[in-house]
Image (cartoon, grey):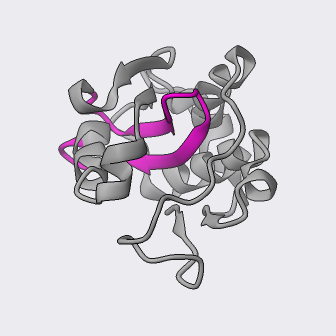
Amino acid sequence: MSGILPEARTPQDAAPSPGPVLLPPHVPLLARALGGYSSSDPYWSQVDTVEAFSPGLYLVVDAKGRIVWLGMAGGDQGVTGRIRTHLVEPWKRAVFHRVWVAPAYDQISRSALEAAEGWAADALDLRTRMPHRTWPPSANWRALVGRQQVS
């Protein structure tokens, strides 16, 4: 699961530095990260109106289009529930602007979601560009999501 390094800041502090600007070629990487568990093309929404109750990956950008968060969500409330949890923190309410959602089929396992999130972080070079953040490893990504086909 993604997060912020504990020594980097506390949730009450100012927002960490944003990452790179999200470019059109970056968006399909979210669905690719989910492999055969991707249930549709990624789409965007304003963070306060997102309706994505399936599991999946999400990428949040600020008002300038810079990446500020990459995460995964599962459970009954899916991405919508996870975004609502984020918005409890004041800095996230102030900074989170739009969210790109890559929905996954309900059958995706937590380990597959974690590997997909790690793969997306690697594909977007976020481990280097956003060193204050942490993401799960992408180990076994192909074995977990690469060959699965759910319908």
* Residue 127 visible in the shown view: yes
Picture residue at 43% right of the left edge, 19% below the top: 44
Q: Quadrant of residue 64?
A: top right
Identify the residue shown where x is 42% and y is 28%: 98
Spot occupied by residue 19 in the image (x, y as percentages of width and height)? 68, 45
Location of residue 91 by image quarter: bottom left
On screen, residue 13 above or below 104: below
Question: How many tags in the picture?
Answer: 0
Look at the image and give the residue range highlighted in magenta. 52-77
21, 146: nearer the viewer: 21
Foreground pick, 44 / 103: 44
State the residue in front, 12 or 121.
12
Residue 73 higher or lower than 100, as above or below = below
Quadrant where the C terminus lies? top left
Q: Where is 118 relative to 26, above or below?
A: below
Identity of the residue drawn at 43% across and 30% down: 99
Q: In this view, does 104 lie to the left or right of 143?
A: left
- Is residue 67 within the magenta segment? yes
Provide residue 78's location: percent of width, then percent of height: 27, 41
Who's the residue at 70% across and 25% down the image?
26
Residue furthest to the front in view is 14
Residue 89 shown left or right of residue 13 in the figure = left
Please state the horizontal and vertical placement of residue 55, each as a whole percent of the image.
Answer: 35, 39
Quarter of the image holding residue 68? top right
Q: Which residue is the extreme one toward the left? A: 76
Q: In the visual, does 86 lie left or right of 121?
A: left
The reply to whether residue 74 is in sight is no
